[in-house]
Amino acid sequence: MPNNKQNLLNLNQTALTKFFETLGERPYRVKQLMQWIYKYHEFDFDKMLNLSKKLREQLNEVACIELPEVVKQSHALDGVIKWVIDTGKDNFIETVYIPEKDRGTLCISSQVGCSLACTFCSTGMQGFNRNLTTAEIIAQVMIAKQYLSDKDRRISNVVFMGMGEPLLNEQAVYSACDLLLDDLAFGLSRRKVTISTSGVVPALLRMADRTSVSLAISLHAPDDLLRDELVPINQKYPIKELISACKNYLNAGTQERHILFEYVMLDGVNDSTVQAKKLALLLKGISAKVNLIPFNPFPETQYKTSKKVTIASFQDVLFDNGIRTTTRRTRGEDIDGACGQLAGKVVDKTKRTRGMT
């Protein structure tokens, strides 16, 4: 694809309107084009016959609609599907579909790798290469939707919980969210789209005013001493600042908001009843729910999964303190598609992974 051609998957409705203005076209063309792309999955301008011949010729000259290549598709025994997608220059990302009886959740990536180096996450060990474009983010949804529609399955929820830290790629992620919520594109409810962050506080403060999608916080520890180790960005934005930003998010806008706090359960590290009590105290008075995530092992990890009885005890403490809590069922583990296992392939630019065996 020539570098000077605009991939229209990069443009939300506002940007697409401006794009058509530069071509001297009326705003109604936006609706026509978005229907072709997102309803009919038609990417060939010449087949968009309700567009004028002149406009089709213009679009062929200056624009394109392209998806990256899927290099591998894996199916887990429990129905989970994982796609490995080529993003160029020997870099690959992963996208996972998780079917349930009442919903179908697509877990998408926002970066090639991740720079935050959370110690319990396989993606973090891969290093970081670059941010994904809006087109590359939306392409993951398009690829999954096209495949699933043939299988009579649907995507009801989209979560930014794949590779990368979404709030270190704000512009592309927010633009993608606009398309996910847009009735002319995917038409999802704001509660069905979730951005998960490890705690980039300045971006979280901006997010409160930029988008109304749901928020998940990768917390994983109830105090700074442990979280500094598990989630290194905590050294820059400690828990007190993070909780303050969360309260700001809850109070922003006119619609009721809630936060999901994610807490990976690491054997002998963060799973004691004392730590559960600390967590309950930390979240007291916040409109929040805690999702306990049994750790999913990957090669070279130093951690082990908490025992089921330990997780149950931890959950009981939270319940007793009025904290809504669920324990996530591990899915897609046999294809390395479970939470924390996504790795893809990353040409690391941080030099952090050099010397690793």
Image (cartoon, rainbow, N blue to C red):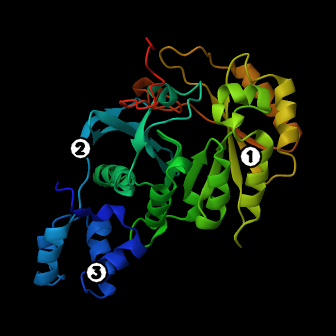
Q: Could you classify mark 1 by the number of other residues whose Cα lies within 10 Å: few (under 14), some (14-19), or many (20 or more)?
A: many
Circle 1: element type: helix
When the figure is inspected, residue 323 is found, relative to residue 249, above or below; the finding is above
Residue 254, by quadrant, is bottom right
Q: Is residue 96 visible?
A: no
Q: Is residue 124 visible?
A: yes
Residue 239: x percent and y percent?
A: 77, 40
Classify residue 102 as left or right of residue 56.
right
The alpha-carbon separation of the residues under discs 3 and 1 comes to: 42 Å
Which of the two discs, 1 and 2, sits closer to the camera? Answer: 1
Give the numbered dot on residue 69: 2
First in sequence, mark 3 or 2: give its number: 3
Circle 2: element type: loop
First in sequence, mark 3 or 1: give its number: 3
Whether label 3 touches label 2, CB < 8 Å: no
Whether label 1 touches label 2, CB < 8 Å: no
The alpha-carbon separation of the residues under discs 1 and 2 comes to: 38 Å
Question: For the residue marked with disc 3, what is the amino acid?
Answer: Thr
Give the numbered dot on residue 22: 3
Residue 111: x percent and y percent?
A: 44, 43
View extreme (top): residue: 357
Q: Please give the name of the residue rendered at 75% of the width and 21% of the height, measured from the top-left corner.
A: 310
Question: For the residue marked with disc 2, what is the amino acid?
Answer: Glu
Q: Could you classify mark 2 by the number of other residues whose Cα lies within 10 Å: few (under 14), some (14-19), or many (20 or more)?
A: some
Classify residue 41 as left or right of residue 278.
left
For the residue pair 195 and 148, the one nearer the viewer reads as 195
Whether label 3 touches label 1, CB < 8 Å: no
Circle 3: element type: helix
Question: For the residue marked with disc 1, what is the amino acid?
Answer: Leu
For the residue pair 60 and 266, the one nearer the viewer reads as 60
Residue 331: x percent and y percent?
A: 50, 32
First in sequence, mark 1 or 2: give its number: 2
